[in-house]
Amino acid sequence: MAYQILLELGFSHCAAMGAALLMLIENALITQSRLMLLESVLIFFNLLAVLSYLKFSNSQKHRPFSLSWWFWLMLTGVACSCAVGVKYMGIFTYLLVLAVASVHAWHLIGDQTLSNVCVLCHLLARAAALLVIPTLMYLLFFYVHLILVYRSGPHDQIMSSAFQASLEGGLARITQGQPLEVAYGSQVTLKNVFGKPVPCWLHSHQSTYPMIYENGRGSSHQQQVTCYPFKDVNNWWIVKDPGRHQLVVNNPPRPVRHGDVVQLVHGMTTRFLNTHDVAAPLSPHSQEVSCYVDYNISMPSQNLWRLDIVNRESDTEVWKTILSEVRLVHVNTSAILKLSGAHLPDWGFQQLEVVGEKLSRGYHESMVWNVEEHRYGKSQEQKERELELHSPAQMDVSRNLSFMARFLELQWRMLTAKSDDSEHKYSSSPLDWVTLDTSIAYWLHPRTSAQIHLLGNIVIWASASLAMVVYVLLFFWYLLRRRRSICDIPEDSWLRWVLAGALCAGGWAVNYLPFFMMEKTLFLYHYLPALTFQILLLPVVLQHVSDHLCRSQLLRSLFSALVVAWYSCACHVFNTLRPLTYGDKSLSPSELKALRWKDSWDILIRKH
């Protein structure tokens, strides 16, 4: 594809062969593809999208609306959707292709030789192929995915309760037969919708807050309320009507609605959920949340909470199991029950802190909860109720989410999911990639010293970066001169130069620069999609220098000899690093040390 792309851009077979050779002898690309990692598939679809668009664009000049014209246009959209489907990083190349296509469409609109109907047909065809088809293809990927992957798995907890309940097994098995509408007397577990740093449930236990914290601040010494990341009998709460003493569901049940005032009674200790004007243990600007213990002192209980259904369709919405996302607003202080995300010290068993956050400080998902497990309470006596909390529910309610609801949630979780913040020993910064100041040890033979490392061909990496600088300087030089009506190169060469830069230099920029804004652990392989576009630019710059800057035949001959010597050098480096690329040869410590070209490659010196 590298060979074909340069031919479609209008460059010589020699330059195209050079691009193909550079792809073949780039050690990092070989290692990544041999180990079946995603970057290779992403690069494939990135290049296929660019190649397909170039073939479509060239067909446009000669045979618009022909069979090949439609084929390459459609294939461009399919390749873009596949690139995004492999990794979200593929959207950068997709946006690049859309940008180039938009510029070409803008020129098409200004073409006076085309009728209005013809222009409209061109625009509709591009919109269908580059916008509608990629969207439908992407939806199709996940439609098939969600049909095939319908069972519960070990990482379901990052998804919402509704999503988990739609999967076979897991939460669906636990929640099967639960009542849909929460009523006064219902026994519920409340899961925080935010789910960060880990999914957790509102929890309490017999332990109380310390009288004095380590920083010298005092507490209410009330029963602790936390968020616990495991299912536990202490996660159960009873929804109580403040005007009645009973903790069972009436017949018929009285559903709880948006705006109703309720009390939450901890199922195992029968204490009421409470908050008051006492600073939280780790978040002193927020209120402490506790289960009220009557110490017979001047600290009255404040245990009334108003139900606010966030995703309600009307103001009379009923509180529903799993489906309703609710905020609990404290009646006395207007504080909202919130997961702060901080881990309590040993006295809090490293569980997560729950606080009362003032409403005026804004809305956040950490303030939203949903009922996950639910049963109608039938026992007024505490001992019977404790046994009841372990018994299965009896009513069957279907909670199948629509495909679009599951699709959108899955996309959001993938976009916002954060990996462990701890630094990986092979992680690196985007600046390290350009200078090849990093590598990754992928594999080490358990008995010999054979090993595989993700290492770049330093000759290719350095030359590609230099080619990028040369291209940018020449581009702005030509642009300034053309502004003064001085054309150093023919018009067709200039257009070819601009298009090659838009796709190759632009491809490098859109696949590299966004990493400076990403708050995630980064590795060298993240640079490979950008590197492939740089490699495509390198023969472009070499041919341009030979054709337009080497004025005499002697200079061209000397330059060609230098290019051949440079390619030979790149091949030599590839062969030198071959044992670490293929891992098929044992290396002694001295041989490993000889492969170092920088002190930063100390990682190659393994313990022997």
Image (spheres, helix red, strand yellow):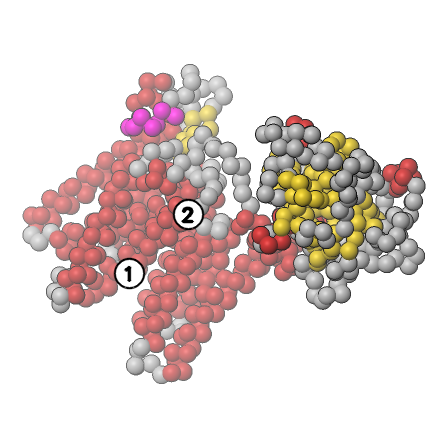
Q: Which of the two residues, 474 or 160, is positioned nearer the viewer here?
A: 160
**In this view, 94 is above or below 592:** below
The residue indicated by pointer 1 is: 499
User: Residue 573 appears at what percent x and percent y?
Assistant: 28, 33
Q: Secondary structure at mark 2?
A: helix
Residue 141 placement: quadrant: bottom right
Direction from residue 112 to residue 392 in the image, left or right: right
How far apart are the two marked residues, 2 and 1, measured between alpha carbons?
27 Å
Q: Which of the two residues, 7 or 84, is positioned nearer the viewer here?
A: 84
Mark 1, other Cα within 10 Å: few <14 / some 14–19 / many ≥20:
some
Q: Which residue: 54% across, 58% down?
A: 138
Q: Which residue: 71% across, 36% down?
A: 220
Instruction: Say which amino acid is labelled 2.
Output: Met
The residue indicated by pointer 2 is: 517
Considering the whole magenta stretch, tell me its main secondary structure: helix
Magenta stretch, residue numbers: 597-603
